[in-house]
Image (spheres, rainbow, N blue to C red):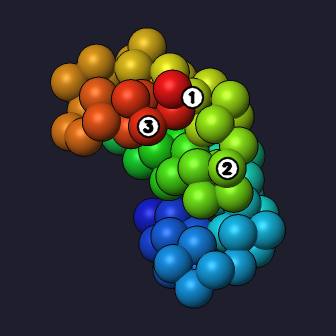
Amino acid sequence: MFLLIQCGRALRELGHNDAAREALKEALRPRSRPAELRQLAYLERGKTYLAEAKKGMARKDFERVLAENSAFPGLDELLDATR
């Protein structure tokens, strides 16, 4: 799962947002993954949505992280970016 998250991040940074979302979607597919990795995947997918100017979708992913872990580093700034 961590490798898929890193792959998604790298693809986003290269400008391949569709491929990044697909990698992150695959990382999030099994629900039995550790909470910390699942939160990181939602955070990275939210950043990908921001890169695509899809603020509503990004906010939705960031709020999922907020519901599980309100102390996630950098989450407040990312939520502010969706406004």
Label 3, label 2: how many angstroms apart (C-alpha)? 10 Å
Disc 2 marks a residue whose amino acid type is: Ala
Disc 3 marks a residue whose amino acid type is: Ala
Q: Secondary structure at mark 3?
A: helix
- In the picture of the structure, the residue carrying the numbered disc 2 is 53
Label 2, label 1: how many angstroms apart (C-alpha)? 11 Å
Mark 2 neighbour density, 10 Å: few (under 14) some (14–19) many (20 or more):
few
Q: Is residue 44 left or right of residue 71?
A: right
Q: Is residue 78 left or right of residue 25?
A: left
Residue name at image x 58 percent, y 49 percent: 50
Residue name at image x 20 percent, y 39 percent: 73
Disc 1 marks a residue whose amino acid type is: Arg
Instruction: Answer whether labels 2 and 1 touch (C-beta < 8 Å).
Output: no
Instruction: From the top left corner, tell me how far across and down residue 7 is, in percent.
Output: 55, 77
Residue name at image x 38 percent, y 29 percent: 80
User: Residue 41: in sight, yes or no?
Assistant: no
Q: Nearer the viewer, mark 2 or mark 1?
A: 2
- In the picture of the structure, the residue carrying the numbered disc 1 is 59
